[in-house]
Image (spheres, helix red, strand yellow):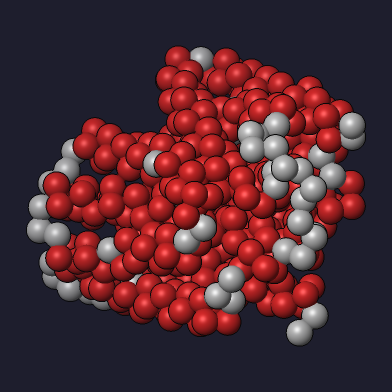
Amino acid sequence: MMPKKSAMKFIVIMGIVSLFSDMTYEAARSITGPYMALLGASATAVGVISGLGEFIGYALRLLTGWLTDKTKKYWTLTFIGYVLNILIIPAFALANRWEYAAALIVMERIGKAIRKPAKDTMTSYAAKEVGAGWGFAVEEALDQVGAVLGPVFVALILMVRKDPKLIDNYKQSFMLLAIPAFITIAILLVARFMYPRPSELETKKSEQTDKNLTKTYWWYMGAIAFIAAGFADFPLMAYHFKTTGVFSDSLIPVVYAIAMGVDALAALVFGRLFDKKGIPVLMISSLIAAMFSPLVFLNFRSNQLILATLGVILWGIGMGAQESILKAAIATMVPSGKRGTAYGIFNTGFGLFWFLGSTLMGVLYDNNIMMLVVFSVIMQLCSIPMLFMVKKEMSR
């Protein structure tokens, strides 16, 4: 098989893995909040556990990224991570106390931390062969299909099931998520059998031999910090939509599904553009993403519904860029032997600044929404000079 065709086949297979895995844990994440409430957890406990799980999940990627480069055990780390990340979810059905469910949430995030740098590194080898932007974009698009299907799947289960004990409906939903979970592992086994040495997919190795990450990479991480800090999380947007009545309760999940659909399409478009134009495409995506917060959070009195929808669409475009070309850019600036470490630092840094930015925006929302908008816009725009420095360093 031709190298390019083989690489694309690997990306599609791993994209399908992402589809079923995202279907599993995005479905679970859509109902863990109310499930923990039924088990007796307070809102504070739900918030703290969710935040703790995300923080641990991102922080551990520093270690697992280094471990990926050190051991080259890409498949081993990916399998261990997926087993924890995916197969733990049906176990939520066995939890009879919220503390047990909380422990499972943290374990699921640890699983993602173990597999993410190894999986991204394997994808980067194939993506370099077909175009880094396009390769990561295809995987992201398939990933987002699962992100839409998962919540719809459990919503249908909860609509159909009419058990008198509400908590049993949730338990049955978690049990049925074992189906996409096992499909994920099965496809992963097929991928391991077909591509035992994924590093060989990249036929044109980088000439860079520096053992340390370059100045270009660190300028890039500076841009990532600003992008992550200024990008609001959807729960805050959903909270705003509910409290202001911009969208009804039943429409908010639909709005999220629209955003995920835009995310998938934007990933494909920006991925293709990135392969042709490079870093300037990231500047454009940051500029577009900077415009979402005024449209979403400010009260324009007239045409509020239309403007908020437009804001959500711009937010989806920003998400599509983040999940595809942000990772693709690393494959173009870091040699293959350092990518596990590079992706580990990238994921940890993005998670840290996203957490700090989201926390600050939550505080600003309660006190001064205009300041929230100003903060979000400035952070996004501050990434552009950093990206200009990245372009300058890469052109040398």
The answer to which image quadrant residue 272 occupies is bottom right
Number of numbered discs overlaid on the protein picture: 0
**Is residue 289 something one can see in this rendering?**
no
Q: Nearer the viewer, residue 297 or 355?
A: 355
Q: Is residue 314 left or right of residue 39?
A: right
Say above or below: 71 vs 212: below
Q: Quadrant of the N terminus?
A: bottom right
Report the residue that reaches farthest toward the left: 96
The answer to which image quadrant residue 322 occupies is top right
**Is residue 278 something one can see in this rendering?**
yes
Say above or below: 280 vs 250: above
Q: Is residue 304 left or right of residue 372?
A: right
Say above or below: 353 vs 114: above
Q: Nearer the viewer, residue 238 or 274?
A: 274
Q: Quadrant of the C terminus?
A: top right
| Residue found at x 60% / y 28% | 225
Q: Nearer the viewer, residue 342 or 374?
A: 342
Q: Is residue 205 left or right of residue 191?
A: right
Say above or below: 371 vs 46: above
Residue 301: x and y, percent? 64, 29
Residue 294: x and y, percent? 66, 28
Residue 390: x and y, percent? 79, 30
The answer to which image quadrant residue 49 occupies is top left
| Residue found at x 43% / y 20% | 363
| Residue found at x 59% / y 55% | 121
| Residue found at x 20% / y 53% | 101
Residue 23: x and y, percent? 46, 67
